[in-house]
Amino acid sequence: MDFQTVLLAILDGLSYGALLFLVAVGITIIFGVMNIINMAHGSMFAIGGYLAATVGGWMLTATMSPYWSIVLLPVVAIVVGVLIGGLLESLLIRRIYGKNPVLQLLVTFAAFMIFEDLQRMVWGGQPYSSSELVTALGVVDVFGISYTTYQLLVVPGTALLVFFALRLALRHTLIGKQVVAVAHNREVSTTLGINVRRVCFLTFVVGSALGALGGAMSVQTTSWVLGIGSEMIVLSFAVAATAGLGQIEGALVAAVMIGLARSFSVYLMPELEVLTPYIIMTLVLLFRPQGLFSVTQARRV
């Protein structure tokens, strides 16, 4: 590989890893606090992308500036997190707290399948895309390589902003400290007067919004089709499992590592592109079943 190909693989890997992190960190915080592996998280990703593409199309029809999409993406994520994530937690998820993990998987997978049919009913089977923001932001020259500003700066910048915002909130705000307390011991938190139900609701809404944000940002560079949520949920679980479920810092490192490995495999051995994330996950779990950044004694956020 020459220098430019290596550089292009690195840039692709960082951009893809940033998108993976946005989705995987939602799974991570939900598991870390609520101890639930949420298969329906892939639906938040898919619906976020569909809704962003739909609203983007309306904006284009109304001849609005594509730069408004910078505001649109987080708004779409918040709407999906609050409305769909909030309803899902209130009507379904809170009824399976503390239940058998197999039951939790089956229930959340059933919710995922229901959302898949709802997507088909609302958006049909045709592909959706929304690349106006990418086009408007243009490209930059990186050592002789023309690379989109969106993928070079906006996507990784958003991932880093989310990462630092989560760490700041968990360490330096009252609700963040309550989230950490519930993650460590729900029973003790209840005796201390913490509203555990409210903390779990807020955690699920934030996690769902992050998944939707990943979808809203991905649709700018990817054609959106039915079933895309199932692909991303599997990849996100690979990231979360590699890092250790419940680990925010680990999710960032694992997402970048898997993103770079996948990107280099595209240029070196394309036939291994799909397998690369799962090869990494398998190798990690063989030697560290708890993940790279977890400890076996306690679960953390």
Image (spheres, rainbow, N blue to C red):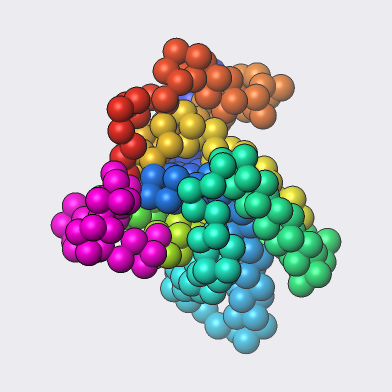
Q: Is residue 25 above or below residue 172?
A: above
Q: Quadrant of the N terminus?
A: top right
**Residue 217 placement (x, y as % from top left):** 53, 58
Magenta region, residue range: 171-200
Total residue callouts: 0
**Residue 47 placement (x, y as % from top left):** 63, 63
Specify whether residue 28 is painted magenta: no
Q: Nearer the viewer, residue 101 or 219?
A: 101
Q: Residue at x 62, y 40 (%)?
A: 102
Q: Nearer the viewer, residue 125 or 132?
A: 125
Q: Residue at x 45, y 60 (%)?
A: 204
- Left or right of 245? Residue 224 is right
Q: Residue at x 40, y 60 (%)?
A: 200
Residue 83 can be seen, yes or no: yes
In the image, farthest residue toward the right = 125
The majority secondary structure of the magenta stretch comes to: helix
Residue 77 can be seen, yes or no: no
In the image, farthest residue toward the top = 287
Q: Residue at x 42, y 25 (%)?
A: 290
**Residue 298 placement (x, y as % from top left):** 30, 33
Q: Quadrant of the C terminus?
A: top left
Q: Nearer the viewer, residue 47 or 39?
A: 39
- Left or right of 122? Residue 13 is left
